[in-house]
Image (cartoon, coloured by chain):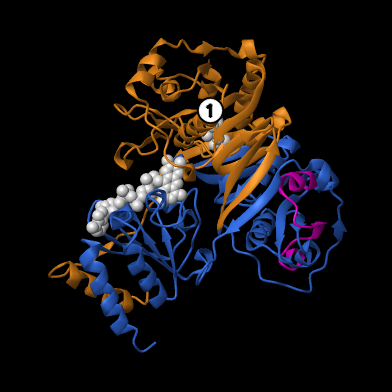
Chain colours: A blue, B orange
Amino acid sequence: MAGVLVLGEALEGAAAASTLEAIAAGRALGGPVAAAIIGDGAKSAAQDAIAHGADSAFVCEGGLGPEAAAAFAEQTAAASAPRVVLGAKALLDGSVMARAAYRLGAGLLQDCASVALDADGRLTATRPVYGGNAMAAFRASGSPAAASLRARAYEALERDDSRAGSIVPIEVDAAAHTRLRVVERVRRPQEGVRLEDARVVVGGGRGLGGPEAFAQLEELARLLRGAVGASRAACDAGWVPPSYQIGLTGRTVAPDLYLAVGISGASQHMAGCSGARDIVAINKDAGANIFKEARFGVVGDWRQVLPAFVDQLHELLSDR
Amino acid sequence: MKIAVLAKQVIDPETPLSAFKIDSDAKRVVTPPNLPPVINGFDEQAVEAALRVKEAQADVFIAVITAGASFAPDVVKKPLAMGADQLVLIEDPAFDANPNPLFAVDVLAAAIRRLGGVELVIAGRQASDWDNAQVPVGVAEALGWPIATVCQRVEARDGKVVVERVTPDGHEVVEAPLPTVVTVSNELGNARYPNMRGIMAAKRVEPTRWSLDDLGVQPREPAFELTDLRLPETAKLTEFIEGEDDADAGRKLAAAMREANLL
Ligand SMILES: Cc1cc2nc3c(=O)[nH]c(=O)nc-3n(C[C@H](O)[C@H](O)[C@H](O)COP(=O)(O)OP(=O)(O)OC[C@H]3O[C@@H](n4cnc5c(N)ncnc54)[C@H](O)[C@@H]3O)c2cc1C
Ligand SMILES: Nc1ncnc2c1ncn2[C@@H]1O[C@H](COP(=O)(O)O)[C@@H](O)[C@H]1O
């Protein structure tokens, strides 16, 4: 039976967390799951993929770009004739799912929160639309159908090293497929915990009024061993780098605690943090949308609320 | 050099939540009364990127392509007022159906071909109605051109395009041969406001109107049927922490969070 093809990537020899999430989604659909893994150390990442639920894998070694990845997707789809193609929305540069779907003549639903098969075996999915202001459900009219998954929508399956499956290397003529040439990569050194991995995230918004306030958020984050993020408004204002942006078009975080300061809670922002277990908000406007999703809230000026909050925390956490 | 910018008219994404309504039976968003639509924000930034290319070199012509079921004339003219040279409108009820990105790709790719001589297509990273983030990739694939997505800087010179792509932890500089497609993101910076002269000039420009027939494109069935559309549920009831003053509330918040095992 034609099954699910999961497009995935290797990061330094291990399967990306988002790839394992997509495999879990594929397994939830039933049917055999073939994982197509591209990247440096794809072969060992394929072992991860199988241990985490894939039934077989295709591998393409090397740090290749999105164009080669699309060609790889095409070749693996030709070999596996999938009914459904899944992958992380952010796979490689974020364009690969769209490239692959177009080449396969498959419709693509982006950033899905859930996927399933209906009684007739057609792909169904739910996804936020209108910036998270609405939830939509779709049903595929034909096959193959493709869906990209939002980060953390699925949890990776438990590792089981007794699982076995075939691993098939695929040659991709990368030179023939590659027209984009990366001339330079500029990475900002990351201090402390990565946003995505942080158990506590402190987010700052336009209400902070300027870049200086973020020093206080950084201090708070250090105290809670967390990381600092921001709304798009704070990033666009240049108060913090774009890599701080949480939301629809920024990073997706799912910490235990998200502490939002001076953030209104626009749906596009919440799209990136609604997976938090608990949200706590400090905002001077009692009607701010953030209070629709917060467990605790203080209606007040962060300039007074935050320093007192931090002082009290120091005291409470002095035993740590 | 001829640049085509893809710009979509959308419901204002900053529509207050209280005005954002859904007709669940019709499975569509109710156009908010008294709130005019806007050009998709990223697409205004695509126009901005094209204008910056135009300012950096001689002989750049900017054509904006907008496809949709119906248009607010003043809204779709905004790119002209910003400084674009031509506006191509493709108005057809087929766009009124459920989201159908592959159909948009057919239409936009055909319009780019019909314009002739386009070397650079600039689009937004995603449209803030259905957040599909896939039409420009489809257009590039249909034309057989490369595409660089999510750019914060676009330069075109010597037969190639040089862009800065936004990455999760910084950016990368990428080169591609022309013709090519790029999409831009908000990191590009704000789009300029039209000035009075631009607005007056835009009034005098008659948009170019093409039909599906002109383009030789047939409507196509959407690959997915929309089966449900609803407002998201928010079930959380916020416990508001109060104090004698804001500082006191801050202290009590810490205590309450500790109590609830959030710290
Ligand atoms: C297509 C699209 C994609 C987008 N993607 C993202 C995204 O990925 N991430 C994102 O964050 N946004 C995104 N946005 C933008 C989003 O719609 C909002 O505009 C943005 O999140 C607002 O940021 P903010 O909450 O910091 O600012 P505002 O909405 O201006 O809110 C500031 C808040 O601070 C409060 N405040 C002011 N002063 C004080 C004070 N002294 N003390 C306490 N509180 C105070 C105010 O009451 C207000 O609630 C996107 C928008 C679009 C259209
Ligand atoms: N109907 C349309 N008319 C003009 N441009 C469009 C249209 N649909 C999509 N685009 C372009 O493609 C980008 C991404 O759209 P989407 O893939 O629908 O999220 C938009 O930001 C526009 O630049």
Q: Residue at x 29, y 75 (%)?
A: A310
- Mark 1 vs ligand 2: CB under 8 Å? no
Q: Is B127 rendered above or below residue B232?
A: above
Examine the rendering and report whether any part of residue A317 can be seen: yes
Residue B214 on the magenta span: no
Residue B95: quadrant of the picture: top right
B6 horizontally vs A268: left or right: right
> Is residue A66 magenta-colored?
yes
Judged from the image, the secondary structure of the residue bearing numbered disc 1 is helix
The residue carrying pointer 1 sits among few (fewer than 14), some (14 to 19) or many (20 or more) residues within 10 Å by Cα, namely many
**Residue A313 vs residue A157: left or right?**
left
Identify the residue at the far left of this view: B244
Above or below, A215 relative to B41: below
Report which quarter residue B12 is drawn in: top left
**Residue B249 place in picture, x, y as percent:** 20, 70
Q: Residue at x 51, y 34 (%)?
A: B49
Identify the subunit bearing mark 1. B
Instruction: Locate residue A22 relative to residue B205 in the image: left or right.
Output: right
**Image spot of residue B80 (x, y percent):** 45, 21
Number of marks: 1
Res A288 visible? no
Q: What amino acid type should be assigned to the residue bearing mark 1?
A: Lys
> Percent x, y for residue A194?
52, 67
Residue drawn at x 33%, y 42% as measured from the top left = B17
Quarter residue B222 falls in:
top right
Q: Which portion, as a residue range, is magenta? A: A49-72
Judge by depth and name the residue closer to the eye, B66 or A6: B66
Outermost residue to the bottom: A319
The x, y position of residue B221, in whole percent, is 64, 26
Q: Where is mark 1, residue-wise? A: B54
Q: In the shown orientation, is residue B85 left or right of residue A50?
A: left
The image quadrant where one finds the C terminus of chain A is bottom left
